[in-house]
Each structure stands twice: as structure tokens, then as C-alpha cells.
Image (cartoon, rainbow, N blue to C red):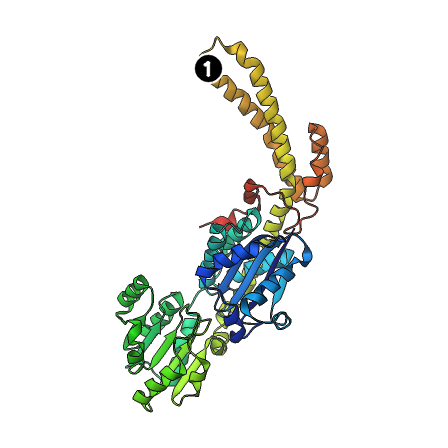
């Protein structure tokens, strides 16, 4: 079995392609369930943000990543031949390292961004709830979340004001010179919109109107920004009196059309309006840019501002890469340790059978004792057996982690558990190959550092 990630991001695909591949959270579980119906897919998890769409999967053979490509092609409507030019594929430890880079913000448009950590956690929760992950992806994503936390705790990769929202406001300032005395409309009340609104207020925006399908989020932003909530029916009216529109909704179709903006501009006349569409799929029809006095920018247009602000965080990239290298190695060592799991289970089973057999023999002879005393004797025998297996189990984990398979064979010979166990052990430490499906084995591939809160 093999681990593979197939995906696109802002470096490999334009916003036109990314919006075709974008998957709303409410559909993600359904899509993952459909993907797992393929016989070659054992586990799957999907990450969908405005800048990326990635599928992490445990497949049965190396060539099975073609199934993922076909799946994406059918979903997006993009011909398979065209899709192959924009999609990247990573396997084994390269896929593991890529996920760690993503969760640390090294693969984001805004270097070190914090949102991606929550997005990875949300993606994993959705996959877990729909039963499309098992011991391998469970362990990988839980470990990755720990790596993301560690990178932000031990380095300054996420410090300072540096985000798509901040870049959007900087671009608005570039157009207007100053935001003081101006008004803004936010369509969408998610994290991206919230950050943009915060930067607007810090830069002197006079009034912020907020429109969203989520009343709780609107109330929170209204309170934080001293803003004003508006109903979707009044969007056109609001557009006639604001100077800045920042939109980041999860709508599947454009909310702001060319026809709508033509009506708005007939009221505004020559008064310019600045629109930043940071949604994927886009909330604003591209044709809106053709209208005079409308300045429309999408998420890809913000890249030059984001790149300009990278210098402070780039100094931390080396430190983050050291953490990623250390955690990737730790994860790989943990995977090797899984080779010992079948042998450990057999050893425990053998010792348990000895315990049960011996207890049955002496139980009848202890009938003269009280139930409490009999239970003390039983627990003492059980404890002795457990203690006898403790050190051998630790040694077996060490042998597997250090590629000492021959020593595992010796352990099997010594304890008489050789038969049938060789087939169950993994052929190698490559992620995703022949791992024993042990529910308790996940703990073997998490380091202490990566699980800190």
C-alpha cells in the first residue's frame, strides 16, 4: 500500500482552474465517500482552500494515483490531459514532508499563514467523521497538526501582519491613498473576511457593512468592528454608497455580476469602487473589470504584495525546515516500528494463553479462599505475565525502528511465534506499504513534541 498526494495550488494553477476544483466543506464528505468506493483507495482525506485542492490517499498500488486524477477530472470538468499539466503528485516520504510544509505555512501564498492549520484540522475531522481515514492517515494528520503547532511555537514564522486580508487592505490604500472617511462592504464573515475587516479598521475605514448567510458570525464581526449588518437583499443598495468591497463567500456562483455592477455604477457615476474578490470560486464575474471606474482584483492579483512582505518571515524558514526534517524522520522511524506490531501481538497472545491456562489450573485449588483473595492471586499472575512481556516488546520496537529485522526473527524463534508472522510484517519503511491495520499502532508514529497543545 502507498501514500500519495495529488493536488494543485496557487503556484501550479490559475484561479480559473482552482475555482473549478474547489470543494465546499458541505460536499467534501460526500466526495470522499464516493472516492473511497474505488477498490484501490484504502483511505482518503481532502484539503480544499482558496489556494489549493489536495487529496491525500493510501492506495493499494503505485499506479493507483491515476484514479485520483480521473476523479478530479470528472468532478471539475477539466479534461484529464489538461489537468495533468497543473497537478503535482508526491508519494511516500515526499508526501509526508509536503503535508508538514503545508501545515506550517511554507507552501502558502502568505508565508507562515495561520489559517492553514485550522483548515488542515477541519479537513481531517471531516474525513474522520465520514470514515475515510484509518490508522495511517489518522496518525499522519494528527502528527501534522502537532508539527504545525510546534513550528508556530518555536519560530516566528507566523509573527507580524502578513496575510491575504492585509494585502487586500494595502492594495485598497494604494488606490485611495488613505482609507479615512471611506466605507466598506464585506460579503462573507469567515476568518479571511474578519482579518480583512480588522485591517480596514486599523487603517481608518469609517464604516463597515457586513453581509453573510451565517448570523452568528455577522453578530461577532459587527460587535468587534462596530459595524452594521445588512441583508442580502440590500447588497445593491450598499454597493452604491461604499468605496471598497471585499468578498470571500463559499457561494458556487458569482454574487456580483456585470449586470448588477452596471446598475450600481449608473448610480455612482464617476465615483470609483475598489473590489477585491478573495473567494474561490470567485464571487465577482471577471467581466465586471470592464466597467469604467471599477477596480477589480482577485486573489492571484494580491501575490505581488504578499511576496513583498515575505522578508521577515523568510528568515524563519530555515528553522521551520529543521523542525519539518526532524518530524519527518520521527514519523518515518515510527512507521518502521510498526513492523514489530504483528510480532508483539503474537507475543502478547502467547503469554495471555499461558496466563489463562495456568489460572484455570490453579483456580479450582483456591476454592477455599474468599473471592477477594482469589482475585488478588489472579491479578498477581496477570501482572507478572505483563511485566515479563514489557522489556521484550520495547526491544522489538527498537529492532524494527533500526532496520534490525533479523533480530525480530530471533525473538520469534526464541518465543516460538515464528509461524505466519513474517507475511504480516511490512516489506519496507516506505509510507503506505503493507502496514498492519492496528488501531493501537497510531501511537507509535506520533512524537511527544508533535502532540503538544
Farthest-out residue, top? 368
Secondary structure found at label 1: helix
413 left or right of 376? right
Report if residue 128 is visible in the image.
yes
Report if residue 104 is visible in the image.
no
Across and down, in percent, residue 166 comes to: 41, 73
Across and down, in percent, residue 218 comes to: 30, 66
Across and down, in percent, residue 436 comes to: 62, 43
Q: Give the answer, above or below, for where 78 lies relative to 258.
A: above
Across and down, in percent, residue 73 comes to: 58, 67
Tally of numbered discs = 1
**Would you call the spot at circle 1 few (<14 residues within 10 Å), some (14-19), or many (20 or more)?**
few
Q: Give the answer, above or below, for where 317 lies relative to 272.
A: above
Image quadrant in which you'd find residue 182? bottom left
Residue under the image location 34 percent in, 87 percent down: 265
Q: Nearer the viewer, residue 196 or 79?
A: 79
Residue under the image location 54 percent in, 68 percent down: 76
Quickly name the residue at label 1: 373
Amino acid at each position: 500500500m502507498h501514500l500519495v498526494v495529488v493536488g494543485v495550488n496557487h503556484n501550479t494553477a490559475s484561479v480559473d482552474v482552482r475555482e473549478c476544483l474547489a470543494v465546499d466543506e458541505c460536499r467534501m464528505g460526500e466526495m470522499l465517500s464516493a472516492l473511497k468506493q474505488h477498490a484501490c483507495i484504502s483511505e482518503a482525506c481532502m484539503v480544499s482552500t482558496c489556494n489549493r485542492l489536495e487529496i491525500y490517499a493510501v492506495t493499494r498500488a503505485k499506479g493507483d494515483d491515476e484514479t485520483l486524477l480521473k476523479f478530479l477530472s470528472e468532478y471539475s470538468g477539466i479534461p484529464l490531459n489538461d489537468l495533468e499539466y497543473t497537478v503535482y503528485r508526491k508519494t511516500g516520504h515526499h508526501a509526508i514532508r509536503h503535508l508538514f510544509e503545508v501545515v506550517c505555512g511554507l507552501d502558502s501564498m502568505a508565508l507562515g499563514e495561520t489559517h492553514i492549520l485550522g483548515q488542515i484540522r477541519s479537513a481531517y475531522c471531516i474525513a474522520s467523521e465520514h470514515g475515510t481515514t484509518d490508522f495511517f492517515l489518522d496518525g499522519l494528520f494528527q502528527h501534522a497538526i502537532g508539527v504545525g503547532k510546534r513550528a508556530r511555537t518555536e519560530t516566528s514564522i507566523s509573527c507580524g501582519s502578513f496575510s491575504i486580508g492585509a494585502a487586500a487592505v494595502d492594495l485598497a490604500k494604494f488606490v485611495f491613498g488613505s482609507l479615512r472617511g471611506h466605507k466598506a462592504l464585506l460579503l462573507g464573515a469567515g476568518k479571511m473576511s474578519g482579518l480583512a475587516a480588522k485591517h480596514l479598521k486599523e487603517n481608518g475605514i469609517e464604516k463597515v457593512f457586513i453581509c453573510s448567510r451565517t448570523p452568528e458570525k455577522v453578530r461577532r464581526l459587527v460587535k468587534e468592528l462596530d459595524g452594521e449588518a445588512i441583508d442580502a437583499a440590500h447588497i445593491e443598495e450598499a454597493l452604491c454608497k461604499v468605496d471598497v468591497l471585499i468578498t470571500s463567500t463559499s457561494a458556487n456562483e458569482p454574487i456580483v455580476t456585470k449586470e448588477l455592477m452596471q446598475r450600481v455604477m449608473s448610480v455612482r457615476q464617476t465615483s470609483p469602487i475598489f473590489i477585491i474578490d478573495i473567494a474561490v470560486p470567485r464571487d465577482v464575474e471577471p467581466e465586471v473589470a470592464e466597467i469604467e471606474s471599477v477596480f477589480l482584483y482577485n486573489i492571484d492579483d494580491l501575490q505581488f504584495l504578499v511576496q513583498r512582505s515575505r522578508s521577515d518571515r523568510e528568515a524563519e524558514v530555515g528553522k521551520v525546515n529543521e523542525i519539518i526534517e526532524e518530524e519527518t524522520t520521527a514519523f518515518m522511524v515510527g512507521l518502521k516500528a510498526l513492523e514489530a506490531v504483528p510480532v508483539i501481538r503474537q507475543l502478547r497472545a502467547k503469554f495471555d494463553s499461558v496466563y489463562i491456562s495456568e489460572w484455570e489450573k490453579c483456580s479450582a485449588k483456591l476454592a477455599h479462599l474468599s473471592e477477594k483473595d482469589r482475585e488478588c492471586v489472579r491479578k498477581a499472575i496477570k501482572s507478572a505475565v505483563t511485566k515479563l512481556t514489557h522489556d521484550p516488546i520495547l526491544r522489538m520496537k527498537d529492532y524494527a525502528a533500526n532496520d534490525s529485522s533479523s533480530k525480530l526473527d530471533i525473538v520469534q524463534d526464541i518465543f516460538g511465534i515464528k509461524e505466519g508472522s513474517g507475511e504480516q510484517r511490512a516489506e519496507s519503511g516506505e509510507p503506505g506499504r503493507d502496514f498492519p491495520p492496528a488501531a493501537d499502532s497510531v501511537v507509535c508514529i506520533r512524537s511527544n513534541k508533535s502532540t503538544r497543545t
